[in-house]
Amino acid sequence: MKHLDILQKLNEIYNANFYFVGGFVRDMLSGIYSDDYDIATDILPDDILKISEQKGITAIPTGIKHGTVTVLLDGKNLEITTFREDFENNGRHAAVKFTKYIKQDSFRRDFTINAIYQDSTGKIYDFHDGQNDLKKGRVKFIGKPEERINEDYLRVLRFFRFFADFDKTGISVREKDLLDAMYNHADKVSLLSADRITQEFIKLSKSENYAKGFACLVSFDNLAKLFSFDSRTVNSKDLSVTKNLDPFVKLALLYRNNLTEFLANRHFNFSNNQKKLIKSILKANIHNLTEDNAKILAVKFGVDIVSFVSIANYLSGSLIKLELDEIQDILNSDLPKFEVTGADLIALGFVADKTLGLNLAAIKQYWLDNNFINKEKCLQFARSLQESSL
């Protein structure tokens, strides 16, 4: 089903007017097509739920407080939000009231390029010259930047995400009103929850041009300080190296020289696995990584740890691209596996107490120091440990 057919079908089912808006329209006008639809409408959410029930259509009140209902239509989950306008907000939460007018709905959106609508006939509704800004490569707040930021402090951070993807030649940060608003309200970002901030940083890290967005962010000293950024590590030396990495890893690489501060910053809320990765990197404390010792370090500390360190070293200039590629080839090869287990030691007569783990660690270090010798020689070494303890 073509995207305009979706709107036409919704119009017929609910006897209302439905429009694509936001990212889908913005990207479509940029030549990027997806099926990630944001849909706006003039019908009330309760009416959508009521009509859906009558016609046997699955509809879920996923964000009913803010007017959002998810409708399952022809195998697609369509997120539909009723036209609304903010009438009360404190920078973190907003109360809304519904409206029948598309133009009123447009004024509560953040940037001009995100407030372009398309109806079922393909007609474009652009009340804030967003198409022109998109063409020029300018990320511009609707109306006064200070007012938009005061509605939701997260818009300070959202700006850098759209800057990364859509700005051309830095045009977006040449306006005094925007710069003043960003500087004057940066401290209010600290009032946001760590969850919202972290989600926004991860979203920015998904961008192919994420380093550009973060470089713009750290140009605001108060934001760099708030998030413990070392501006010297925010560069776009070779984005092809980080292109396919997990977004969290890409973000952590920007903090490669101050991972301790990254982990401790109270404005972030990372998962246990994400914290574990950073703690493991810090604990490994690898200072001299080369092609010669990469295999041993990977077996000892893990491929993910050594891979992170190798890319961090390249970005910082202590490895050249050829060395990085060679190390990555090693990490992608079949690495040796330590085959001795606790059960093997118990079979040799070792006592199954707290010393068992210490002995196993000593044997593994012997295996590493002797170029991954075979299991039988490792067990011979184990016997010598046992004899020396008698």
Image (cartoon, helix red, strand yellow):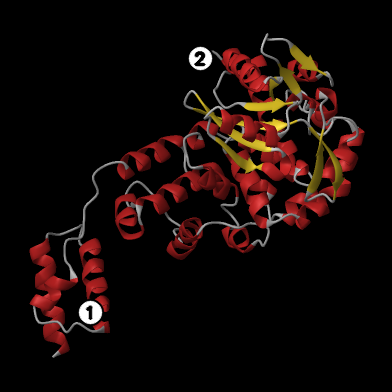
Q: Which residue is mark 2?
A: 1
Vertical comparison of 166 with 318: above or below: above
Vertical comparison of 128 with 178: above or below: above
Query: Who is closer to the viewer here, 379 or 145?
Result: 145
Tag 2's secondary structure? Answer: loop
Q: Amino acid at mark 2?
A: Met
Q: Residue furthest front?
A: 54
> Horizontal and vertical percent for residue 203?
61, 40
Q: Residue at x 11, y 70 (%)?
A: 379
Q: Amino acid at mark 1?
A: Leu
Q: Residue at x 81, y 29 (%)?
A: 105
Crowding near pointer 2: few (<14 within 10 Å), some, many (20+)? few
Q: Which residue is mark 1?
A: 356
Image-based side of 213 in relation to 365, left or right:
right
Query: Who is closer to the viewer here, 253 or 13?
Result: 13
Quarter residue 362 falls in = bottom left
> Horizontal and vertical percent for residue 313?
50, 47
Crowding near pointer 1: few (<14 within 10 Å), some, many (20+)? some
Q: Residue at x 66, y 26 (%)?
A: 39
> Horizontal and vertical percent for residue 94?
80, 46
Image-based side of 34 in relation to 126, left or right:
left
